[in-house]
Structure formats: structure tokens, C-alpha cells
Image (tube, rainbow, N blue to C red):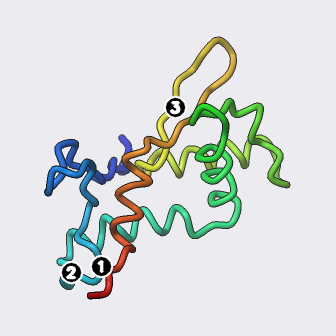
Amino acid sequence: MSHTKALPLLDPEGQDGRGAAPCCPPLTERPMNAEEAETAARMFKALGDPVRLRLFSAVASHEGGEACVCDISDVGVSQPTVSHHLKKLKEAGLLSSERRGTWVYYRVEPSVLAAMGRLLTAPPAV
């Protein structure tokens, strides 16, 4: 039995009609409650490792918005370690994957990037 939990990063309808809503309010809006902080911490913890951050960046910036594991595994660690880090990113809800034949393709949903951006975005100065 797995103790991992997919993060509820998004409300597909959005809170304000502008698209994806973050898992939590923007940091400048109000203090997070315990559940929101736990959700955001899981996401940032997954990205807190330099290899995971490089893999996440490689997938997010890859042409077409998805990348075969064969195209992103050159990050200075062994293939089993790459697989471990990709698994951690999936468990945190930051990546999704699809097996096609012998290869696995990973993608970052645009709404995940939008949610992360909104969490850290300050309101415009008035």
C-alpha cells in the first residue's frame, strides 16, 4: 500500500474564471492554513533536489510539452536514479506519464505551472 498522495493543485474551473487556481492562495493574499501549507510543502520538497529540478525543467521546456525519458536522462546520475527522481515528481503531482512501447513519456500540465506561478506571484503595485 502506498502512502503517497496526489496533490490537489488545481481547480479546473479556477476561482476567478481565469483558468487554473493554485492549491493555495497567493502567499501575499493571506496566511496559509495547515492543509494548504502541507500541500505546497510537498510540491516544493519534490523540487528541492537539484536533479529533480533539472528533470522537471527538462520536461517543462521540451518541445511539445512532453519528453521521453530517453531524452532527459542525461543529468549526471544513473538511469535508476533518474527513474527514482521522476517517480518522486509524479508522486508530488508535478508530472504525469504515459508508456508508449518501451519508453515512458513525461509531461508537465500547463495548469501545474500556472498554479505554481500564481502561488508565488505578488499582486501588481497600485
Task: Name the element at disc 2.
Answer: loop
Residue 59 in picture, x, y percent from top left: 62, 43
Q: Amino acid at mark 3?
A: Ser
* Residue that label 3 marks: 97
Depicted 98 relative to depicted 31: above or below? above
Q: Which residue occupies 55% across, 44% down?
A: 87
Q: Earlier in the sequence, mark 3 or mark 2?
A: 2
Depicted 37 relative to depicted 20: above or below? below
How many marks the image carries: the answer is 3
Along the line of sight, which residue is nearer the eye, 80 or 48? 48
Residue 50 in picture, x, y percent from top left: 68, 66
Q: CA distance from mark 1 to mark 2?
A: 8 Å
| Number of the label disc, if any, that sits on residue 29 | 2
Depicted 117 relative to depicted 73: above or below? below
* Mark 1–mark 2 CB contact (< 8 Å): yes
Q: CA distance from mark 3 to mark 1?
A: 33 Å
Is 74 left, or right, of 10 in this rendering?
right
Residue 117 in picture, x, y percent from top left: 41, 64
Is 56 left, or right, of 112 in this rendering?
right
Q: Amino acid at mark 2?
A: Glu
Q: Which residue occupies 72% across, 49% down?
A: 81
Q: Amino acid at mark 1?
A: Pro
Along the line of sight, which residue is nearer the eye, 62 or 104? 62
* Residue that label 1 marks: 123
For discs 1 and 2, the disc positioned in front in the rendered view: 1
Task: Name the element at disc 3.
Answer: strand
| Number of the label disc, if any, that sits on residue 56 | none
Q: Residue furthest bottom?
A: 126
Q: Give neighbour class at mark 1: few <14, some 14-19, many 20+ (Cα, 10 Å).
A: few
